[in-house]
Image (spheres, rainbow, N blue to C red):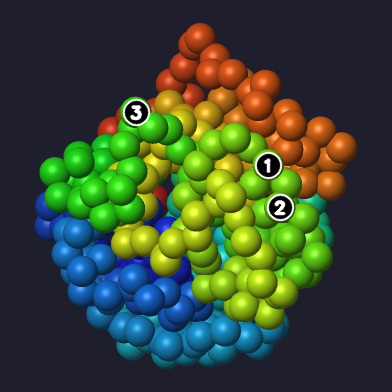
Amino acid sequence: MKIVQLVGARPQFVKLAPLSRVIREAGHEELIVHSGQHYDIQMNEVFFRDMEIPPPDFNLSVGSGSQASQTGEILSLIEPILIKQKPDLVIVYGDTNTTLAGALAAAKLGIKTAHVEACLRSFNRSMPEEINRIVTDHISDLLLAPTDKAVDNAKREGLSEKCRLVGDIMVDSLAFGIAKARRESKVLKELKLTPEEGYFLLTLHRPYNVDDPHKLGHILSSLDTLDTKIIFPVHPRTHKILQAMPTRQFKNIHPVAPQAYLDFLMLMDNCDMMLSDSGGIQKEAYILSKRCVTLRPETEWVETVESGWNLLLDPDNPGFPHAINDFQKPVTHPEIFGKDVAIAMLKELNELVDR
């Protein structure tokens, strides 16, 4: 079987890593295509070495752009690769413009397509990611769903016949990454952190939280009132806005450079709580048994909220940030994301190609 895996950002490479390993171990031919949708200073040889995956066979180097121009450029660049390589299967991940463009290109060429992390819904169509998810699910041949809620979404949209519950690939990714981070990362020493001292870990990158300097200032100044050290690896998007803001001095927030993957995992592994507007971090925090405060009004990962481990807290909410102090760790931690996920996915991929 010849497989093309299409990804566009570091989080998607993290998801690709365990599936790539089992695909190659099974003797299948794999080609990795990186769209270059997200420029990431940590997307380098060290990253691929840490995750033990080969570097991309193709790099489209698309870069930033509007939703339409970026999607269109990826679509036009991936099509000739697929025509020449003639894969049996294309695999796309998540909810980016790369995801949508890859699924569209494969579908138009009649190539079977599998969507990893399928059928998630935030039910907020103002988010470009929500549109990408919906369209990708409807044109893909196999939907690899991470949770029961995702399966319910598939049923509601008439997609049950091609949806399979396999669990979340990040379970495998994190098990591998955390073990390696604990052996190799020196970030705690470099940042002079100790688990005994305690700290929160903050990430911000959503446009509605960081593009408006006033909104970003409100979030940071409010969080700074919490009586806890907050480590804040600053996303490049957020850094640009911070640079344009009047100088701000924080008592508890400690901005640091973006972290390499294993270092960031080490910071997560030792923090008391995650504060983030990311989708993936909500899930990673849950898998690592960390409380997470999601700085958004909605989430795709409703299971984490229902379990009590994830608190949805809109920064515009009057309870922000004070509700964070009352957020306690739940007593139970159900296994909601599965195990040995890459192996389950490969079984479904084999059956798809054999049909």
Pointer 2: what residue? 221
Q: Secondary structure at mark 1?
A: loop
Give the alpha-carbon distance from disc 1 to disc 3, as whole Å.
21 Å
Q: Do callouts 1 and 2 mark residues in contact (Cβ within 8 Å)? A: yes
Pointer 3: what residue? 196
353 sits to left or right of 62 = left
Sequence-first tag of 1 and 3: 3
Residue at image location 43% in from the left, 88% down from the top: 61
Tell me the amino acid under the disc marked 1.
Answer: Thr
Whether residue 258 is visible, yes or no, is yes
Give the alpha-carbon distance from disc 3 to disc 2, as whole Å.
25 Å
Q: Nearer the viewer, residue 354 or 234?
A: 234
Q: Secondary structure at mark 2?
A: helix
Residue extending farthest to the top is 331
Classify 10 Å Cα crowding around label 1: few (below 14), some (14-19), many (20 and above).
some
Tell me the amino acid under the disc marked 2.
Answer: Ser
Pointer 1: what residue? 225
Residue at image location 20% in from the left, 59% down from the top: 50
Position in image of residue 224 (x %, y %):
64, 47
Name the quadrant containing residue 275.
top right
